[in-house]
Amino acid sequence: MTDRYFQTRFTEDPRREILWRTLVRHYFQSQIPDEASVLELGAGYGNFINNVRARRRIAQDQWPEFPKHLEPGVESHVGPLDDVSFLDDNSIDFVFASNLFEHVSQEEFATVLKQLRQKLKPDGTITLLQPNYYYAFREYFDDYTHKTVYSHLSLCDFLQANSYEVITCKPRFLPLTLKSRLKVSPFLIRMYLLSPVKPLGKQMLVRARPVPQNH
């Protein structure tokens, strides 16, 4: 099923590299120190992790072909999402996942969050980018692999219920797909990030950190 998904619904697209190179350079990189250890879950074609500057870059996906898309120096781990035992405890500064957790059950999501609590450093964070059902309800299930519905409200509540503190919640961060009417160019992406108005903005961004155990 995974291979067929990458051959049909989620095919390789050069516009994706333009998008992620610009997003990392003009938004995400400022949150990632040079000495950080960064983990991307569900890395796919590696467009995010390949563009990050960090001391250590780690990518995980269950798709067996994904390591060949990674740049030299990026560590790869092929395996199920809900098993991050390959990571050392207290070793990760920044976790990122894009368009991932709508594809799995809430139970699997909760398992990942619980495991990441051990893997994150005390000041480590997770950043999630995914469709916001509040705005994308018409198209949400056009992707046949979507299993679970989240809006910016329910995703923040779910994180809090699993002992995470929400730092940032942007209900309209990006358009839903590359297939939108907006042209994919570095200049337009930068202007979109800076604009208070987000036309076609149907993807949300949520950043959170674990609540200390003695909280």
Image (cartoon, grey):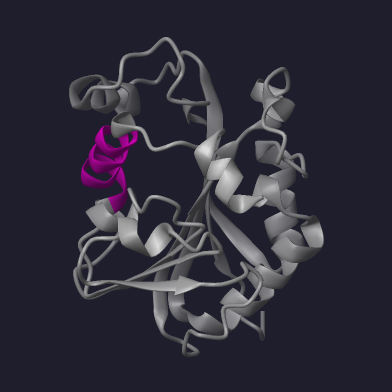
> In this picture, is 197 found above or below 56?
above
Give the camera-side residue of 87 and 60.
60
- Residue for point 74% across, 43% down: 154
Would you say residue 20 sits in the magenta stretch?
yes
Q: Residue at x 30, y 60 (%)?
A: 70
- Tell whether 145 sits left or right of 183: right
Give how far across and how far down residue 141 sits, in percent: 73, 28
The answer to whether one can see residue 171 in this image is no
> Who's the residue at 28% across and 62% down the image?
32
Residue 213 placement (x, y as % from top left): 66, 84
Image quadrant in which the C terminus is located: bottom right
Task: Answer whether residue 33 is magenta in the image.
Answer: no
Q: Toward which corner of the image does residue 33 lie, by quadrant?
A: bottom left
Q: Main secondary structure of the magenta part?
A: helix
Q: What residue is at 51 percent from the left and 82 percent from the top?
A: 119
Residue 136 sits above or below residue 170 on the image: above
Q: Which residues are magenta?
A: 16-28
Query: Can you say whether 119 is above or below 111 in the image?
Result: below
Q: Position of residue 55 (x, y in %)?
A: 21, 75
How many numbered circles does the render carry? 0
> Outermost residue, top direction?
181
Residue 44 position within the rendered picture, expressed as x and y whole percent measured from the top left = 45, 52
Say if residue 48 shows up in the picture. yes
The image shows residue 214, relative to residue 74, as above or below, that is: below
**Is residue 34 rendered to the left or right of residue 196?**
left
